[in-house]
Amino acid sequence: MKKVVILTILVVLIIVIAAVLIYLNGNGTPTDNSGDIPIFVPASAKYALVETTPNSTNGKVNISGRIPYFLEEASEDDDARALSDLNFAKEVNNQIYDVVNTYSEEILLFKDGVSYDDKDNDIINNKQYRYTIDYERYNNGNFISLVLLLNYNTGGLRSNVWKEIFNVDVVNNKIIKLSDLFSSSTYKYEIAKEINKQAKERYINLLDEEGIKSIPDDQKFYIKDEKLIIYFEKSAIGKDELEFTMPYEFYTLSNCFVLK
């Protein structure tokens, strides 16, 4: 009888180990970086990006930087995968292009010393106008957060620094919204409450002295090191750009956050 019990336990253990290995093969693989400590690699880390460099100097106008795009052709490299839905990859790339190109076209109109709003009458001075684009990539579970870092400077007439963010589920081929990350319907209220708390602790003066009541459905955010970071552009809720790291736990298996 004891032998039967032991054998049953061994079979169960083998099944569990096999299931874990199968999961890791498709959703992140532990790799040994030092020979002793296993490091978990998210599934999203295996998906490749390509970069373009829009380096252009035309008179007074300088456009430079790095722009990330997903592969639009199938890849045979398992560690540099393309998305399974190449049409979705093109869709995301088009959105990235539209964001970047809008300001490229605008600033190029300054090359003749003419303003965008009134190109027939409003002549502006001879200063150097710059538009730089860079990005940061963060892998978490099935998600890639692409954070575009945009710096648009028109020689004092207009200067702005902000972020455009794309959160992509590379396994299921979809753009992720905040609502996809929570099972609770109260997440917007809880996030707003946490932001007000942190603003008070960090002595940040919000535009509304009573704090924010909620956040919009299209609130900007990204995920870094399994932490949810809420981002606000300059003058959105305060004088400057603001970021707040939420104290919520990220569950890799379900790719969601749980409110504490």
Image (cartoon, rainbow, N blue to C red):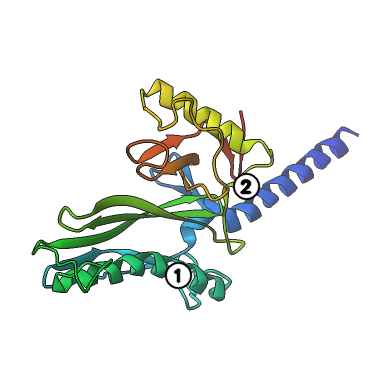
| Residue at disc 2, secondary structure | helix
Which residue position holds label 2? 179
**Residue 170 position in % (x across, y down):** 55, 61
Which residue position holds label 1? 93
Q: Quadrant of residue 152?
A: bottom left
Residue nearest the observer in this picture, 116 or 73? 116
Q: Residue at x 59, y 38 (%)?
A: 188
Q: Quadrant of residue 192?
A: top right
Which of marks 2 and 1 precedes in the sequence?
Answer: 1
Residue nearest the observer in this picture, 162 or 174? 162
Q: Quadrant of residue 107?
A: bottom left
Q: Can you say whether 248 is above or below 143 in the image?
A: above
**Residue 17 position in % (x across, y down):** 67, 47
Residue 41 visible in the picture: yes
Residue nearest the observer in this picture, 47 or 53? 53
Report how far apart the C-alphas of labels 1 and 2 lie in the structure: 23 Å
